[in-house]
Image: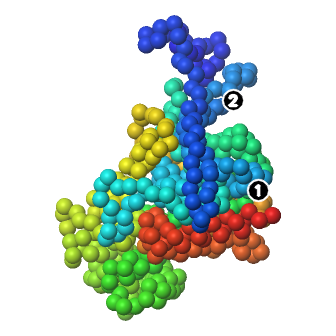
Amino acid sequence: MAAKDTNVKAGNAPAEPEDTTSKGEDTPEPTDDLVSTAHSITVRRRKLNYTTTTGRIVLRREVLTDGAFDGHLPKAEVFLTAYTLDGADPAERPVTFAFNGGPGSSSVWLHLGLFGPRRVLSGDAGDRATPPYGLADNAETLLAHSDLVFIDPVSTGYSRPVKGEKAGDFHGFKADLESVGEVIRLWTSRNGRWMSPKFLAGESYGTLRAAGLAEHLQTRYGMYLNGLMLISSVLDMGTIRFTEGNDLPYALFLPTYAAIAHYHGLHGDRPLAEVVAEAEEFAGRDYPWALNRGHRLAADERADIVARLAALVGLSEDYVDRVNLRVEHVRFFTELLRHRRQVVGRLDGRFLGWDDDSGREHFTEDPSYAAILGPYTAALNHYLHSELGYANDLPYEILTGNVHPWSYKEFEGAHVSVAEKLSAAMRANPHLKVHVALGYHDGATAYYAAEHVLAHLSIPEELRGNIESAYYEAGHMMYVHEPSRLQQSKDLAAFVKAASAR
């Protein structure tokens, strides 16, 4: 017979239909399917022996029926990959919990692009790798300084709800924090790591998740962190969402537009630093003032703003005037090199591509995403199955739209922001350090928008020194640019070491 629906109150349960697929048998209880393997890597002439544990762990919930405890019932199977250094002292050894964003992204990008002991060889802008791509040891792996746990939220990677549970119940801001937070609590408890220095590393929406988790882990479990690594940060969606009546993103994306125009030769031989400094000054004062003036802007004032804006972003004055001084980001990526019949990337403005119609208003595909999807997907599937020995016939969801619609019901119509949650976490835990990694050519989460949010955190002046920022001449996944990857690896290692010091 089918298992009883525990959400129906006792005494009102409907008749149980016959289960024709497994007559006379209950659905098997889901169990963890973790696989552990031993490995080693040489980092700076030092051999590191480590254990990799990969697979799905079962998340459970306490169920009450009419006030009576019904059990600790399974709700989802969450996929993770953990790397632990053999023989390390848990009290001294840091651990970093890492995830990407989307929402809808697996953790593959940080896993095989930056942190893990193996990394994908994907090439870079203008020099993309040829299929079937490759994997290599990552001599700059953060494993040299911290154990690593990569988490795929429900519906990404191999993570799925268990039979009878709705995937949509996990697809939202609060539900996501609760499920990922529960994975972190379980792993920490099962591996005896409550006394270890602990870090969260998130990318893109994963930074919003990380900031929210810092506050959630403190208030729900009393788990205080040493640090957050926010890579391609977005803590306030209002700073990156181009919606009617919201002029803020137009100003905050301006320095990114200028940097991308510079990369493609539209600023001559001017240094990048000089170009973005001019753009930041304009975006911080005159430009938002002009947008705020609306039709009160005098003709000569408007002409001056049009000329300055066009020169900075590499577009014609006619175009800037026609869009009413407001250059939306996908329109920018489509328009910038239209004269060459090329489009530039959103995730990384250094990448170029083509559309089938060079007259489009919005490109149909982001060439920077197309450049990395194949290499990372091939590498991940090979790595898990062939090198780590994990077997699963489900498709590994690299970046899925199945999580949409994503619920932000907790914000009740207000714009989505975790700035106050991060501020609260820092005020309650004055030892919490924050590292923010920013790409000049990131057209998804503009670096100047992140700066804006950080400058408005509600924290006392003495805690502002807990925040550090690092800048790279690359995009959203800045580590696909080899010089940036090498520098970023050094920066993050230094951050973990400093924030772990007692």
Q: Of helix, strand and loop, which one carries label 1?
A: loop
Q: Which residue is at the front of the view, 76 or 4?
A: 76
Decide if residue 3 is on the left or right side of residue 474.
right
Establish if 219 lies above or below 201.
above
> Residue at (40%, 91%) from the top-left corner?
270
Residue extending farthest to the right is: 502
> The C terminus appears in which quarter of the rendering?
bottom right
Q: How many tags in the picture?
A: 2
Name the spot of residue 1 as percent of width and height, x first.
52, 9
Task: Identify which amino acid the numbered label 1 is placed on.
Answer: Glu
Residue 453: image x %, image y %? Answer: 59, 69
Q: Please tell me whether mark 2 or mark 1 is closer to you in this view.
A: 1
Instruction: Say the numbered circle drawn on residue 62.
Output: 2
Amino acid carrying mark 2 in the image: Glu
Tag 1 or tag 2, which sits nearer the N-term?
2
The tag on residue 92 is 1
Number of other residues with Cα within 10 Å of mark 2, as a class: few under 14, some 14 to 19, many 20 or more: few
The image shows residue 331, relative to residue 165, as above or below, that is: below
Of residues 420 and 438, the one nearer the viewer is 438
Q: Which residue is drawn at 40% across and 68% down?
A: 348
